[in-house]
């Protein structure tokens, strides 16, 4: 069997194993409920397949013209003065901008003039589950658009880093609709929007947005530009490969399984991907049997898994001293502390963010067992 067919079998086995392991319920099994009688399909029609387990977030049409204006430093400094910035703080902002860049310097200044934002960001950096509601409260209370932009940006980053790209997309949709051109964070917001779309995955939307980021932000940090170029190349190659198209669907299903979303739609998706994998394996084996001559052992491997690398920071199975995840920390919290966070969701948050955070904490609770 050629290496690619072997790799496909391994991927299919891994997906099936993950599904079997993660689908185990954490609590004692309940007595089976009476089976509901499904409505018969119309004569001559196949039953409609189940929809995706996780609804895809809305993605507004992409602007044809560049909507990002050059950073207005005077306007930003005036906004910071309105929030209480001193001349000494503004002076440090200018010096820091020349050293670490406008985006980082502006965010440091905004944290300096907004203790609430600084405290919420520290919670996020410390892996505190309360960080999301703390950032949302800063966002709800903010009257100055620049402060609102920074709070929304950090909330979206929390969602991206927490493997919740759908929520990040929704937060950044609001950023671009309401907070554009008031902060030098616009470039990073554009990058993470494209990244979140790729992580869902929604490659047809991610690819043009990575291209736009590279075109519209030529002076962005080289770290972001290099990452965008790498993801862009991956997406372009995936467009030409049936295998990569299948991998996108499997990625979405694997994320659902990892977060303990094991309902019927996920199971249907998993079964469909395994069936498609088996079809691909048969096609590759037929091609191999029809080719003449035995493959040389010195030929480069066709295994795509060996040609890719984990992104920096991604942990491997069995890694020692693994840092606790947000789900772990949520599970370690006392019930009273979780109830306090739930109560804060009901106080002063915009309805769309209250709903978003309720969804976030619900997923967080499912992602790991409570201690």
Image (cartoon, rainbow, N blue to C red):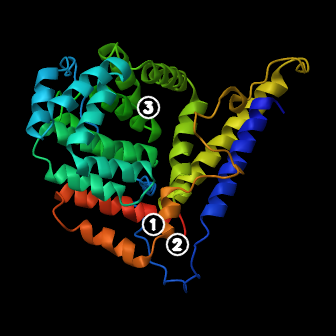
Give the residue number, with chain letter if any, for mark 3. Answer: 203
Q: Nearer the viewer, mark 1 or mark 3?
A: 1
Q: Where is residue 289 in the image (x, y as percent from the top left)?
A: 84, 27
Labels 1 and 2: the sequence-earlier one = 1
Labels 1 and 3: the sequence-earlier one = 3
Q: Is residue 39 rendered to the left or right of residue 332?
A: left
Name the residue at 67% across, 36% down.
280
Name the residue at 36% across, 60% down.
130
Labels 2 and 3: the sequence-earlier one = 3
Query: Crowding near pointer 2: few (<14 within 10 Å), some, many (20+)?
Result: some
Most extreme residue toward the front is 88
Disc 1/disc 2 C-alpha distance (Å) = 8 Å
Give the residue number, with chain letter if any, for mark 1. Answer: 365
Residue 370 disc label: 2
Which quarter of the picture shows residue 213? top left
| Depth order, front residue of 149/18 | 149
Count up the numbered dots: 3
Mark yes or no: residue 204 visible. Answer: yes
């Amino acid at each position: 069997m050629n290496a690619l067919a072997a790799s496909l079998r391994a991927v299919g086995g891994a997906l099936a194993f993950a599904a079997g392991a993660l689908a185990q319920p954490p609590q004692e099994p309940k007595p089976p409920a009476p089976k509901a009688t499904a409505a018969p399909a119309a004569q001559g029609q196949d039953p409609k397949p189940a929809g995706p387990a996780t609804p895809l977030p809305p993605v507004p049409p992409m602007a044809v013209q560049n909507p990002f204006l050059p950073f207005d430093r005077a306007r930003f400094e005036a906004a910071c003065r309105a929030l209480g910035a001193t001349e000494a703080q503004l002076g440090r902002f200018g010096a820091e901008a020349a050293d670490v860049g406008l985006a980082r310097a502006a965010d440091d200044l905004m944290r300096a003039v907004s203790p609430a934002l600084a405290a919420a960001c520290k919670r996020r950096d410390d892996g505190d589950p309360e960080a999301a509601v703390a950032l949302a409260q800063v966002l709800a209370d903010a009257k100055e658009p620049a402060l609102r932009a920074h709070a929304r940006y950090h909330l979206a980053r929390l969602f991206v880093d927490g493997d919740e790209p759908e929520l990040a997309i929704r937060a950044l949709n609001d950023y671009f609709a309401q907070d554009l051109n008031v902060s030098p964070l616009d470039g990073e917001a554009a990058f993470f929007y494209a990244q979140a779309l790729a992580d869902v995955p929604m490659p047809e939307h991610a690819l043009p947005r990575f291209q736009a980021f590279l075109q519209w932000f030529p002076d962005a940090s080289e770290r972001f530009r290099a990452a965008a170029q790498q993801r862009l190349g991956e997406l372009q190659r995936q467009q030409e490969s049936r295998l990569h198209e299948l991998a996108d669907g499997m990625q979405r299903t694997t994320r659902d399984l990892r977060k303990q979303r094991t309902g019927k739609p996920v199971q249907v998706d998993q079964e469909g991907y395994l069936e498609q994998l088996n079809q691909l394996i048969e096609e590759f084996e037929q091609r191999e049997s029809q080719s003449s001559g035995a493959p040389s052992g010195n030929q480069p491997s066709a295994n795509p898994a060996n040609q890719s690398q984990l992104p920096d920071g991604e942990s491997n199975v069995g890694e020692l001293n693994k840092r606790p995840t947000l789900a772990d920390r949520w599970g370690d919290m006392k019930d009273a502390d979780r109830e306090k966070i739930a109560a804060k969701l009901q106080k002063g948050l915009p309805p769309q963010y209250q709903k978003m955070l309720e969804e976030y904490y619900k997923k967080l609770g499912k992602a790991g067992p409570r201690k």
